Amino acid sequence: MTQKLRLFPNLVQAVVAVLLEIFGPRHQQADKAIQRCLRSNPKWGARDRAFIAQTAYDVVRWYRLLCELAQVVPRRPHEWWQLIGVYWLWQGNELPPWKEFEGLTSEKVTQRWHQIQDQRAIVQSIPDWLDARGEAEWGASWPTILQALNRPAPVVLRVNRLKVTPEQLACALAQEGIRTRELPACPDALEVTQRKNLFATRAFRQGWFELQDAASQQVAPFLEVASGMRVIDACAGAGGKTLHLASLMQQKGHIIALDVHEWKLTELRRRVRRAGASNVHTRLIAHSKVVKRLRESADRLLLDVPCSGLGVLRRNPDAKWKRGPAFVESVRQLQRGILMRYCRMVRPGGKMVYATCSILPSENEQQVAWFLEHSPVAFVLEAQQMLRPDEFGYDGFYMARLRRCD
């Protein structure tokens, strides 16, 4: 933020309400809490809405640092006002003379800032366990990765080539005041450089694009699908990568989208209809027979497995405050179970991609190495790729392509 910006009490109160939802007993996800707040106040203008969303995300992202600078761990509303006041000063702005900000000065914030410079976990605003884990697994690369994870995420669209080209979409969005740029390393992507409400656009309603980070967009092409194949997306979730696969296959072939949560498949089916992807079929994994019946039926299998999500902290910063070492260990065991049970769906000679949005080698390369040693059927590793947020510039993602031996 630039200096001499003004604060308005009603907007600060809205941010406080959002933060209480995120950090309070409900532990609401940050994006959901912000969306609910904005929907409940449709009369707010674009600037007001942007202020609320950006401020809430920034306070969540820098929560530990701001608590240190404010010398308070907020629980009650007036303490959250203090934290927001410190955030405002830390951004180089001046505070209005409100009673909620009594005792806060830029001199105090600056003095405390200089006192903690040698404490990386505080300065970079992460839990101690995560700093220790990152250093143990990444060594000297960890500081730069960590800094990248604290940068706000860019907004990237995936063009639905079933309906439109990138050039056509860019032109349509420009007519609604939304500017974009192409990404040379990502042929189906447009990065938004001038943002408005994307979901209110005619292009979105017509199914011309989906929000999907550039790193996430690397996964579907990595599976090497072709028209006419039988493809299974076994951890489909709400279907971002499923839809990308459908676009790559140009509706020629068969995609089976599986998940253990019916509500996710309901959302996937809604998105499939909007995208016009007629070759996608959903199945709920209600019991183990669903997977067993698909044995050796897939030319390609995508396992975008549940993970710690540490590669997408820039867009889900609240995750670092709501997860811990026990959670990481539990998802590692879940990942191994999925690999061992689902790999049999690949036919001999077929291929499988194991993918996560984690940056931890213990969830990525080490899991693949373990699987190759313990797999019930023989696979060979064809290729693997780690998209580091500090190098690729977007989310942190890992993918490995394995071929089942004939």
Image (spheres, rainbow, N blue to C red):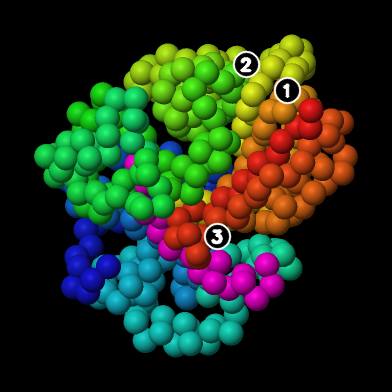
Q: Is residue 41 above or below residue 254?
A: below
Q: Is residue 251 left or right of residue 133?
A: left
Asked whether disc 3 touches disc 1, contact meaning CB atoms under 8 Å apart, the reply is no
How many other residues sit within 10 Å of disc 3, few (<14), some (14-19) or many (≥20)? many
Residue identified by numbered label 1: 347
In the drawing, what numbered circle is on residue 284? 2
Q: Identity of the amino acid at label 1? A: Arg
Q: Identity of the amino acid at label 2? A: Leu
Q: Which region shows up in magenta?
A: 138-157
Residue identified by numbered label 3: 388
Residue 45 shows in this picture: yes
Q: Nearest the camera: 213 or 153?
A: 213
Q: Is residue 316 left or right of residue 305?
A: left
- Give the number of the mark in front: 3 or 2: 3
**Mark closer to the chain start, 3 or 1:** 1
Provide residue 113's location: percent of width, then percent of height: 47, 82
* Spatial separation of the CA atoms under disc 1 and disc 2: 21 Å
- Residue found 64% across the figure and 37% down from its top: 353
- Residue found 54% across the figure and 72% down from its top: 144
- Residue found 62% across the figure and 70% down from its top: 142
Element assignment for label 1: strand
Asked whether disc 3 touches disc 2, contact meaning CB atoms under 8 Å apart, the reply is no
Q: Residue furthest left?
A: 175
Asked whether disc 1 touches disc 2, contact meaning CB atoms under 8 Å apart, the reply is no
